[in-house]
Image (tube, grey):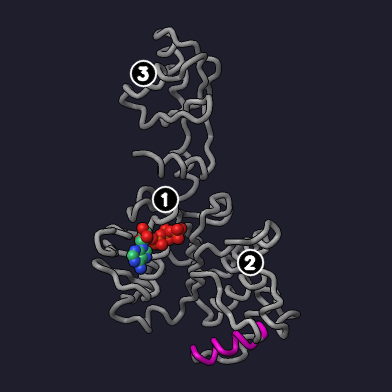
């Protein structure tokens, strides 16, 4: 059984297709990265997975249950942090969690346990108003942990944090993942996703444009990088005519070619034959960030 499965999941807001026939599978125990530029439909997808937004079409299945038909069964072992955390500022961290535990029918002992997990035990009695942003995010993760979730969905968990706070949350996510839980991590911080996730899906304008394990996507992101003397225009036009070249982009004074890196010598020879002076050429190894930019910018 998968932790998450979406089948042709679609959400339309009036004319706008926020999520377009999304087929996504997240296996149990995976740390899955969900990426996409602003407005790609990530939050809408998570909201549908949590039963907060009704799909226009398609199905969301969480922990083996259809979210629309059996929301209680689907979501019993799911924890989520989907927006900037909202807590009562004049209650302590522990009291905020007690309120949530009571509302969710969760035993009060869990509060102490989850506070320990996010290392907030020693500040648990202080008012949330006195917490740093990083502590509030940790408290939000603690809240998501209350139902002892098998599956945790985190939407931009490090948003607004300084580097130290970001590292703390990253370590916390690692710990949660080590416990065998499934994590769906929605983030713009590609470096982080690359560090934490085994598989990713990239969404653009509601559509899945790439998915797979990070290592394979990065191999796909490999290509050839070159610089020519003078105007790059003629080289770009020539390279675009080659059937085995997927895309050609100009980045600063470099030309990035999405083509097998073992064709570097061939590209060099072709350019020389066309009287283009190649100043530098070699295989490029992209980071997930470069790959992400390439696939989300391609027409
Ligand atoms: N309630 C709504 N009514 C109308 N349009 C909406 C609503 N919610 C989202 N949208 C639109 O749906 C699209 C997808 O938005 P969504 O928030 O899911 O994207 P996202 O990938 O999470 O982006 P971000 O990273 O900026 O949060 C956007 O064009 C957004 O404007």
Whole-angstrom CA distance, mark 2 to mark 1, is 24 Å
Observer-side mark, 1 or 3, equals 3
**Dot 2, crowdedness within 10 Å: few (<14), some or many (≥20)?**
some
Q: Is residue 167 left or right of residue 189?
A: right
Q: Residue at x 42, y 17 (%)?
A: 266
| Residue 107 vertical placement versus 16 (above, below) | below
**Dot 1, crowdedness within 10 Å: few (<14), some or many (≥20)?**
some
Q: Residue at x 41, y 51 (%)?
A: 202
Observer-side mark, 2 or 1, equals 2
Q: Answer with the quarter of the image where residue 42 lies.
A: bottom left
The percent position of residue 196, horizontal first and vertical second, equals 57, 56
The secondary structure type at the circle numbered 1 is: strand
The residue identified by callout 2 is: 172
The secondary structure type at the circle numbered 3 is: helix
Which residue occupies the extreme right position in the image?
Answer: 122
Name the quadrant of the N terminus.
bottom left
Residue placed most toward the observer, 86 or 192: 86
The residue identified by callout 3 is: 238
Whole-angstrom CA distance, mark 2 to mark 3, is 49 Å
Q: Residue at x 32, y 60 (%)?
A: 18
Mark linked to residue 212: 1
The answer to whether the beta carbon of the residue marked 2 is less than 8 Å from any atom of ligand 1 is: no
Q: Answer with the quarter of the image where residue 165 lies.
A: bottom right
Q: Which residues are magenta?
A: 92-104
| Residue 210 vertical placement versus 239 (above, below) | below
């Amino acid at each position: 059984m998968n932790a998450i499965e979406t089948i042709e999941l679609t959400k339309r807001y009036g004319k706008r297709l926020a999520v377009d026939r999304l087929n996504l599978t997240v296996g149990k125990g995976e740390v899955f990265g969900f990426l996409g530029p602003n407005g790609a439909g990530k939050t809408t997808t998570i909201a549908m997975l949590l039963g907060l937004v009704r799909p226009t079409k398609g199905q969301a299945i969480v922990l083996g249950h259809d979210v629309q038909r059996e929301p209680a069964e689907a979501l019993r072992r799911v924890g989520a942090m989907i927006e900037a955390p909202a807590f009562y500022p004049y209650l302590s961290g522990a009291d905020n969690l007690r309120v949530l535990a009571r509302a969710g029918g969760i035993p009060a002992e869990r509060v102490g346990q989850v506070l320990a997990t996010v290392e907030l035990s020693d500040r648990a009695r202080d008012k949330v108003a006195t917490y740093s942003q990083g502590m509030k995010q940790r408290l939000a993760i603690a809240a998501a942990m209350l139902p002892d979730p098998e599956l945790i969905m985190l939407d931009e968990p490090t948003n607004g944090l300084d580097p130290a706070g970001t590292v703390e949350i990253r370590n916390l996510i690692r710990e949660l993942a080590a416990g065998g839980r499934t994590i769906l991590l929605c983030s713009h911080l590609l470096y982080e996703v690359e560090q934490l996730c085994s598989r990713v899906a990239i969404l653009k304008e509601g559509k899945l444009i790439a998915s797979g394990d990070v290592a394979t996507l990065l191999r796909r992101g490999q290509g050839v990088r070159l610089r020519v003397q003078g105007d790059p225009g003629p080289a770009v036009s020539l390279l675009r005519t080659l059937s085995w070249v997927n895309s050609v982009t100009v980045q600063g004074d470099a030309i990035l070619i999405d083509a097998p890196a073992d064709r570097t010598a061939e590209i060099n020879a072709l350019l020389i034959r066309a009287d283009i002076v190649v100043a530098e050429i070699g295989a490029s190894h992209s980071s997930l960030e470069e790959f992400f930019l390439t696939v989300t910018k391609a027409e």
